[in-house]
Image (spheres, helix red, strand yellow):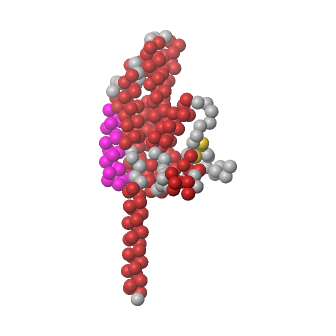
Amino acid sequence: MHRMWNRSCLFRLSLDEEIRMTTRSEHLEPRWPAMVALLAVGGLRLALPEPLSVGPAWLLIVVVGALIIPTVLARRRGNDRLNQILGYLLTSLVTLDMVWSLGLLLQALPSHKETPKDLLISAASLWITNILVFASWYWRLDAGGPRARELRGVQVDGAFLFPQMTLDQQSKRKMGEQCWSSGFIDYLFLAFNTSTAFSPQTPLFYPPGRRSW
């Protein structure tokens, strides 16, 4: 009798584990939008004049492309820790490059060495870069990052309050959002809104421990 009970428990545990693995695999968050955004940052750097960038214009996009390859391989092999470290490294590199170029642009304004056309193109490129960089950080940090959101399956908490998180279960089922979790496009929309308006934007930002408001 004891042996039969052990077998039934093992069967139940294996069945529950299979269900969890199936559920997780159905809600894997696509990573390609974030990769495209980082490559776009490298491409936008090509629009900057040589005095407003560090090194050759093609340097950033080559470095980003070279680091994306091991990042993808680490994810495919299930090495989540390495994937996370490389993701932070990639985002940090494009952030530092953007800040450096922005500083060079501010220095170039009073010197009048660059043409107005070049300054406008550079400012527009850096503004778009700023949106993509902030979206990348939001996506990588909110609710524990993309891998943590995948394992959780459903997003119910995080630094930002998305409209889907305020719905009750019945409304979520009607809208087909019962397994909703934020993706890169959501954070890109957030970054665009916050960069074009000084007023508070939806989704709202909630510091940890202040959700009781």
**Residue extending furthest right?**
213
Q: Position of residue 191 (x, y in %)?
A: 51, 36
Query: Residue at coordinates 65% horizontally, 49% vertically from top-left?
Result: 210
Res 68 visible: yes
Front one among 178 and 146: 178
Q: Position of residue 38 (x, y in %)?
A: 40, 36
Front one among 118 and 54: 118
Q: Position of residue 22 (x, y in %)?
A: 38, 61
Res 140 visible: no
Query: Residue at coordinates 38% horizontally, 66% vertically from top-left?
Result: 18
The quadrant in which residue 125 appears is top left
Q: Main secondary structure of the magenta part?
A: helix
Q: Is residue 73 magenta?
A: yes
Q: Is residue 77 magenta?
A: yes
Query: Residue at coordinates 41% horizontally, 49% vertically from top-left?
Result: 29
Front one among 70 and 183: 183
Question: Which residues, given as a range, are shown in magenta?
Answer: 62-81
Looking at the image, residue 32 lies above or below residue 156: above
**Residue extending furthest front?**
174
Q: Position of residue 47 (x, y in %)?
A: 39, 22
